[in-house]
Amino acid sequence: MNKNNALKYVQSNNLIGIKAGSERPDFLEIWMVTVRDRIFARSWGIAERSWYNTFLKDPAGKIKCGNHIYTIKAIIPDDIDQLTEEINQAYLAKYNSEHNRQYAIGIIKDKHVEKTMEFILREEE
């Protein structure tokens, strides 16, 4: 596994594929950001079958970075309170196009901040 390749991909691409849990057959494209060489995402939706809620029940998953698929473990990091502002700024900086701006401003609101997860790349890849 090359963590740097995954980090570079997430930094330079707006939509990254994610497969939450071990039951889902397909990748869903979502927004992800990097902070301190770590990968984070926030759930936009609040559906019971969302990727976020799936990860709460089963933290195993995968992210797709171009042609490479990485096995991940989704966690709510212990230091989330210290990272929240940096994650907010990462979303605003990365998703700053005219089309994305309103969603970037939305995703830094409390109801989405509360649904922040970190994706830990597993070494077996």
Image: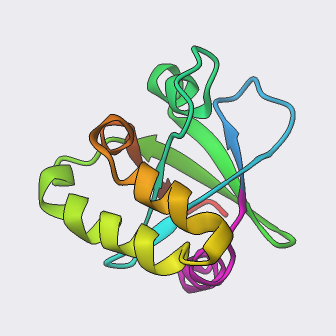
User: Image quarter for residue 64?
Assistant: bottom right
User: Image quarter for residue 87?
Assistant: bottom left
Scheme by which the image is coloured: rainbow
The quarter of the rendered structure image containing the C terminus is bottom right
User: Image quarter for residue 28?
Assistant: top right
The magenta stretch is 1-16
Residue 1 visible in image? no
Residue depicted at x 49% and y 19%:
57
Residue farthest to the top?
Answer: 48
Residue depicted at x 54% and y 77%:
96
> Is 74 situated above or below 54?
below
> Is 31 situated above or below 18?
below
Q: Nearer the viewer, residue 41 or 65?
A: 41
Q: Nearer the viewer, residue 78 or 51?
A: 51
Magenta residues: mostly which secondary structure? helix
Residue 114: image location, x then y, percent: 30, 37
Residue 51: image location, x then y, percent: 61, 33
Q: Nearer the viewer, residue 123 or 45?
A: 45
Q: Is residue 2 magenta?
A: yes
Residue depicted at x 78% and y 28%:
24
Left or right relative to 75: residue 33? right
Residue 83: image location, x then y, percent: 21, 63
Residue 8: image location, x then y, percent: 59, 85
Q: Nearer the viewer, residue 91 or 49?
A: 91
Residue 83 visible in image? yes
Left or right relative to 14: residue 104? left
